[in-house]
Image: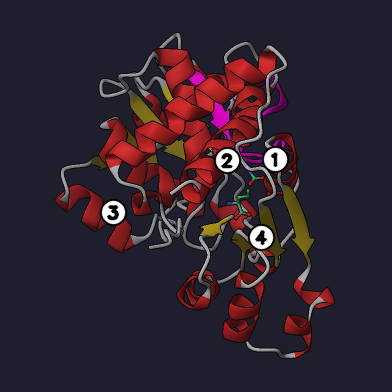
Amino acid sequence: MKKDILSVTDLTKQEFADVLNLASDLKEKRKKGILGDLLYKKSLGMIFEKASTRTRISFETGMFELGGHAIFLNPNDMQLGRGEEIKDTARVLSGYLSAIMVRSFYHKTVEEIAKYATVPVINGLSDKEHPCQILADVMTMRETFGEDLSSLKVAWIGDGNNVCNSLILSSLYTRFEVRVSTPKGYGPDGDIVKSTIEAGGNVRFFESPDEAVLGSDVIYTDTWISMGSENEKEKRLRDFSGYCVSRKLMEKASPKAVVMHCLPAHRGEEITDEVIEGKNSIVWRQAENRLHAQKALLVKLLHK
Ligand code: CP
Ligand code: NVA
């Protein structure tokens, strides 16, 4: 049966680890100039309802490097933009492609494509989750702290958004503690938090960012204005003041704490220029790892 990756937990704990191990292996080999042809003649269709730099280019390059091919699909240039049904599009694309990646405003669009497609569907970011990002993030944490992340404290500062939701779910596999600090009304998805805690995950909430970062090993932040919330910009800038990851905040964390950001970053809003450019920032390696993690994910999905 085909496997879709709409959520972090669409991978089992073992599959999650297998993807990360393969990702590290592919990264090592690539450094030596070995690319291989694990996706020879495979095709990935990438539907982007929203902008992308990392996701698009890492998927496209990843497919090319492994001997396959990726096609960028702008819904406005497809019949989708003229009203062709999502389910019809999904069925037709399945006749041509080996897999489909979708970045959508609505998680239910990704679900509908997955329902009707007969090839694997990957969520390349929805309003609910960003599983590909989290694979790269956990890979980056493993490179930094070693394979066992269970003693780590990971502070999420800012908006409890799609990336935060996926980070919380990943804690079921990594066993790290997630310490969330968001303004009121901007918390992560309630069902995701509930199911993670019920399944034994360690998710804690802190009113102030200062308390959340105290003794934390990873400080993770993301934009306060995700794609689709641009019309709330003024209100959000007001509501999130006090949630900037600054040097002052970093001084409260563990001295070896690293800073993560899924990017794109907005210097002077969720993070200062000094912190993102500072020696504790691992954001550029985090971004690079999107390539390796997604290559590994595609290999696992297409070699079943
Ligand atoms: N982090 C991330 O998904 O970046 P893009 O929006 O550039 O793809
Ligand atoms: N939370 C951000 C992530 C961008 C990669 C957004 O959804 O816009």
- Asked which secondary structure carries label 2, the reply is helix
Q: Is 20 displayed left or right of 41 in the figure?
A: left
Q: Marks 4 and 1, how far apart in space? A: 19 Å
Disc 4 under 8 Å from ligand 2? The reply is: yes
Q: Marks 4 and 3, how far apart in space? A: 22 Å
Q: Marks 2 and 1, how far apart in space? A: 8 Å
- Sequence-wise first label, 2 or 1: 1
- Label 4 sits on residue: 227
Q: Position of residue 30 (x, y in %)?
A: 67, 20
- Asked which secondary structure carries label 3, the reply is helix
Question: 89 or 158: nearer the eye?
Answer: 89
- Label 2 sits on residue: 294
Labelled pair 2, 1 in contact (Cβ < 8 Å): yes
Which residue is painted at 69% across and 69% down in the image?
231
**Mark 1: which amino acid?**
Ser
- Label 1 sits on residue: 58
Q: Is 261 displayed left or right of 200 in the figure?
A: right
- Label 3 sits on residue: 193
| In the image, residue 37 above or below residue 47 | above
Q: Marks 2 and 4, how far apart in space? A: 22 Å
- At label 2, counting other C-alpha atoms closer than 10 Å, the crowd grade (few under 14, some 14-19, many 20 or more) is many
Circle 4 or circle 1, nearest the eye:
1
- At label 1, counting other C-alpha atoms closer than 10 Å, the crowd grade (few under 14, some 14-19, many 20 or more) is many
- The magenta segment is 257-274
